[in-house]
């Protein structure tokens, strides 16, 4: 790429206009200020040609961890429309925020990409005595297995994948919401990485014997390159 790309990112924040996300770990008002400033920066800088918006939709809308992965993230977690706090339904909050964001970006004649999150792996169902056999050494912190980001046995692979049926249940509502909103904003491109990581039976945290994740819901450098190779196809200067 030749530059001109802005990727809005903030830990535990949602990159949507006037949407605040706060919890025990992030103060109220911190995320909305950071995200609004970033969106304003993109709008005001004509040299920025591509905006990528990415977030963990199911996690923040439901406020519920997937298979108990990263439970600390959800401690007192909440989302709020700062311009209309009377809206309390979390699904409606997210929809309104998406619509407000996409409307604000209208008529810019630039590349707007909304990225649906990669599959969450969550914790597996092994007992503590079998923890050494998990795909990830400890799914509450960012850590590889002690012998590195490769898989050493068939047991590793079993524990580093999620049944497609569980994934579908987790994301169906969010995917439907994104498609519903996107239908009203044809200038916004939707990037869905599901087919990169999933087949009809499972969603995988690996390719071959190589791990693609650094924890239960974040890609490692290798996984990021795998995703980027597909995402880059949408990142083109607007005419």
Image (cartoon, rainbow, N blue to C red):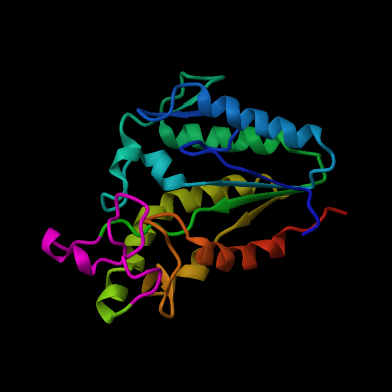
Relative horizontal placement of residue 225, taking residue 24 as reference (left or right): right
The mark total stands at: 0
Q: Residue placed at 44% from the left, 23% from the top? A: 27
**Which percent across, then down, holds residue 20?**
50, 27
Instruction: Look at 68% across and 34% down and name the residue there.
Output: 39
Is 223 on the left-hand or right-hand side of 110? left
Whether residue 165 is visible here, answered yes or no, is yes
> Foreground residue, 118 or 127?
127
Image point 70% across, 65% down: which residue?
Answer: 233
On the question of residue 19 being in view, the answer is no
Residue 232 left/right relative to 194:
right
Quadrant showing the C terminus: bottom right
Query: Of 27 and 39, which appears nearest the observer?
Result: 27
Residues 144 and 200: in front is 144
Counting from the top left corner in percent of width and height, residue 1 is at 77, 59
Task: Determine if the magenta segment contains residue 146.
Answer: yes
Q: Position of residue 71 (x, y in %)?
A: 29, 43
Where residue 59 sits, quadrant-wise, is: top left
Query: What is the magenta segment's predominant secondary structure?
Result: loop
In the rendered image, residue 164 lying in the magenta stretch gets the answer no
Where's residue 224, x and y in %?
A: 55, 62
Give the residues drawn in magenta, as a range: 124-151
């Amino acid at each position: 790429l030749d530059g001109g790309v802005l990727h809005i990112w903030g830990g535990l924040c949602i990159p949507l206009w006037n949407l605040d996300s706060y919890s025990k770990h992030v103060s109220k008002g911190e995320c909305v200020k950071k995200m609004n400033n970033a969106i304003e920066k993109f709008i005001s800088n004509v040299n920025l040609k591509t905006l990528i918006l990415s977030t963990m939709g199911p996690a923040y809308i439901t406020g519920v961890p997937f298979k108990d992965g990263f439970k600390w993230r959800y401690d007192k977690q909440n989302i709020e429309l700062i311009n209309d706090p009377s809206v309390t339904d979390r699904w409606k909050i997210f929809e309104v925020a998406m619509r407000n964001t996409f409307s604000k970006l209208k008529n810019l004649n630039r590349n707007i990409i909304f990225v649906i999150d990669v599959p969450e792996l969550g914790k597996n169902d092994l007992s503590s005595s079998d923890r050494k056999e998990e795909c990830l050494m400890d799914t509450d912190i960012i850590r590889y297995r002690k012998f590195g980001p490769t898989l050493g046995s068939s047991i590793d692979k079993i524990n580093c994948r999620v049944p497609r049926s569980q994934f579908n249940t987790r994301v169906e509502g969010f995917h439907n919401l994104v498609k519903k909103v996107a239908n009203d904003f044809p200038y916004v491109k939707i990037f869905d990485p599901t087919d990169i990581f999933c087949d009809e039976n499972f969603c995988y945290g690996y390719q071959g014997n190589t791990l693609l994740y650094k924890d239960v819901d974040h890609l490692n450098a290798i996984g990021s390159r795998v995703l980027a190779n597909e995402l880059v196809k949408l990142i083109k200067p607007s005419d």
